[in-house]
Amino acid sequence: GYAASVDLNRNEAIRVGRLAAELAAAAAGLAPRAIRLAPATAAVARWVTPARIDPGAIPVPEKQALLQSAIAMAETVRGVNQVSGSIGFRRLETWMGSSDGARIEQMVLIPSIELSIGAGERTDAQTRSWPSSHGGFTCTGGYERLQNVIQADSICRAAEEAVALVHAPPCPEGVVPLILAPDQMSMQIHESIGHPLELDRVYGVETNFSGTSFAQPERLNTPVFGSTHVTVVTDPTEAGVLGGYGFDDDGVPATSVTVIRNGRLMGYLSGRETAARLGTVSSGNNRAADWRHYPINRMSNTRMEPGSSSWDDLLAGAEGGLLMATNRSWSIDDRRDSFRFECEAAWEIKGGQRGTLYRNPSYSGRTMAFWASCEAVGVPSLYENWGTPSCGKGEPAQSIHTSQGAAPARFSSVPVAPSGHRKGHPHG
C-alpha cells in the first residue's frame, strides 16, 4: 500500500500512514504470493554529495554568464547559425525512516549544462550536441564541475562538426565493424543492459516504457552477453556520477555489484522485495523519483569495465568500419531483445585513422548477439561517464536520474544504414 501528501504536519502524517496500511490490507487478498523482504541492516546515517562549491551560493547572474560564455564560444565558428543551451542545478533532500529502525538523511547536488549547436542551408540542417545529447553534462557535485567542463576547444570542435555535417555524405549501408564512442556506449548500456536487468521488469511486474526483459532468471550464470570483454557493475559509489547516492529508498547502502562478468549474467538490479523473490540480497537499486511515488527497481550508475585496447588498437581492428558518436534517437522492442539507434555523427575508419565524416548514421542489432560481438574495449584512460537526467519508467510514470560509464568499444559485423532526423523519446 502506498499513500503520500505534501502537508507536513502530525495529523496528516498519521492519516497518510493509516491510508497506506488500509490499501495494503485491501490488496493483500489479490496478491499472487506473500510479500517478503530481503534482509538489510537498519542504517542510521547522513550522506551528502561531495562538493567544493555549493551551487546555491552562486548568484544567478554568474550562472547565466557561465552559460553565455559557452554559447559565445560556439558562435565564433563560421557557418553556425543557431546555438541554444541550458544550465541547471538541483538539490534533492530526502529523509527516510523504516519500522526496521532505519533513519537516513541524504542530500544530492546535481549540476548540468548542455548546448545544441545548429548549422544548415536550404538542403539540410544538422545539429551537434555539446558535450553530448539528452542532458549534456549532468553529474553530481558542486559548481566547480561545470566550471571545469567548459573548454573552448571541445565546444568549437562540436560547432565545426555541425557545420561539416551539412555537406557530409550520408552514412553508407552495410554490415561493418563498429566502434561506439563513450557517450553512445552510455545509451547502449542504458537501454540494452540496464533496463533489462531491472528485476521487476524480469518478473513482469513492471512493463511500462518498453516492457519486460529477455534476461530471465534461468539464464543466470550463462553467457547471455557472450563476449568475455563484457563485464558490467552497478555502482552508485563511483565519485561524481549522476547515478550516485549513499542509500536507496529501501535504506540499503550503495554498493558495487557485478551483474555481468566476462559475458555471463551474474545478477540483477533489485530492491528488497524483488531480491527476496530471487533468494538473494538487494543490490540497493530501489528508488522513487520523488515523494509522490513509491520506489521501484531502477538503474543507478551502470558501468562497463574498461579493457586493454588503446585508441590506436581499436581503430586498427576496425578497418573499413565506422565510428559513431552521440545518440540522436532510439527504438527498442518490448523485451529489450532488439534495437536501433541513430547517432549525430559517424566517421569511416581507414588506415587506422578516422576518415570521412558521415551524416545521419544508424546501427541496429539483436541485444545478445550484439554484445557477443564485442571484440575490444578501451583502456581506463578512455573511460567516460555520462548522465541520463530523465529516465522514465513506471505507471504512474516516474522520471529519475541515472548514469552509465564506458570506454569506447569495438563490435564486429554490425548493420549500419542512413537515417532521418527522428528524435528519441526522453524516457525509457
Image (tube, grey):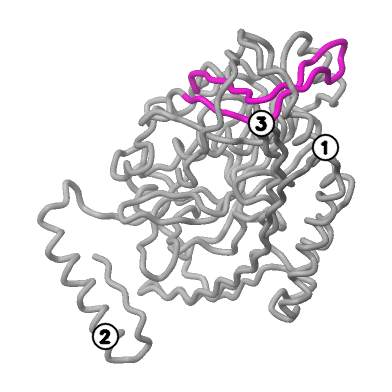
The residue that label 2 is drawn on is: 14
Disc 1 to disc 2, C-alpha distance: 60 Å
* Mark closer to the observer (3, 1): 3
Residues at discs 3 and 1 in contact (Cβ within 8 Å): no
Q: Which of 90 and 66 is in front in this view?
A: 66
| Label 3 SS | loop
**Vertical comparison of 264 with 150: above or below:** above
Percent position (x, y) of residue 120? 70, 35
Q: In the rendered structure, which segment of residues is drawn in magenta? A: 339-367
As drawn, which residue projects farthest toward the bottom? 10
Q: Which of 239 and 252 is in front in this view?
A: 239
Q: Would residue 384 appear left or right of 372 to someone viewing this image?
A: right
Q: In the picture, residue 370 is in which quadrant? A: top right
Residues at discs 1 and 2 in contact (Cβ within 8 Å): no
The residue that label 3 is drawn on is: 122
The residue that label 1 is drawn on is: 160
Disc 3 to disc 1, C-alpha distance: 18 Å
**Kind of residue at disc 3:** Arg
Overall secondary structure of the magenta stretch? Answer: strand
Disc 2 to disc 3, C-alpha distance: 64 Å
Earlier in the chain: of badge 1 and badge 2, it is 2
Percent position (x, y) of residue 46? 59, 75
Residues at discs 2 and 3 in contact (Cβ within 8 Å): no
Q: In the picture, residue 384 is in which quadrant? A: top right
Percent position (x, y) of residue 7? 35, 85
**Kind of residue at disc 1:** Glu
Earlier in the chain: of badge 3 and badge 1, it is 3
**Vertical comparison of 173 with 106: above or below:** above
**Kind of residue at disc 2:** Ile
